[in-house]
Amino acid sequence: MEPREEQTGRQYPYGPAAIASAVVLGLYGITLAPTTAFWDASEYIATAHILGIPHPPGNPLFVVLAKTWSLLLGVFRIPVAVRINLLAATTSALTAGFWFLLAHRLVTGLR
């Protein structure tokens, strides 16, 4: 069984990871595409909007998540392309936070 944080005395930098995610989300928000882009981005926006099937392998999880995200953000009356691009920016920012935590774990050592 894995020891608890209190037992090991190890501190996890959740605050700095959240700040890193917020900074990345801010940068992505500033540079967010206002409409569809080239190649796959347009295809995924369109298929998420109609809940269709993009080219193989299809990425059904992304399509379902994007459709749900789009419906939830629909109350703000922003274009569908911006909503889906905002989903991609948000998930990428969360990924940056996870990478921050992973890098911290690797730098401080695996104990």
Image (spheres, rainbow, N blue to C red):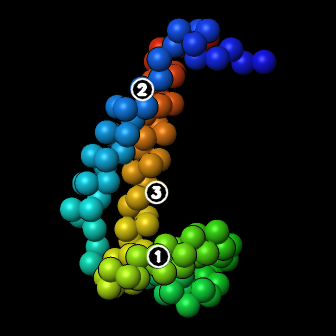
User: Callout 2, which amino acid?
Assistant: Pro
Query: In 3D space, how far apart are the residues under numbered discs 3 and 2 (Cα atoms)?
Result: 20 Å
**Residue at x 46% of width, y 57% of height:** 91
| Image location (x, y in percent) of residue 61 | 64, 68
In which image quadrant can residue 8 be found?
top right
Q: Mark 2 points at which residue?
A: 13
Residue furthest right in the image: 1
User: Callout 1, which amino acid?
Assistant: Leu
Secondary structure beneath label 1: helix
Label drawn at residue 42: none
| Image location (x, y in percent) of residue 62 | 58, 69
**Residue at x 43% of width, y 66% of height:** 87
Q: Name the residue under label 1.
A: 72
Q: Earlier in the sequence, mark 3 or mark 2?
A: 2
Q: Name the residue under label 3.
A: 91
Q: Is residue 30 above or below residue 3?
A: below
Secondary structure beneath label 2: loop
Q: Is residue 68 above or below residue 110?
A: below
Q: Which of marks 1 and 2 is in front?
A: 1
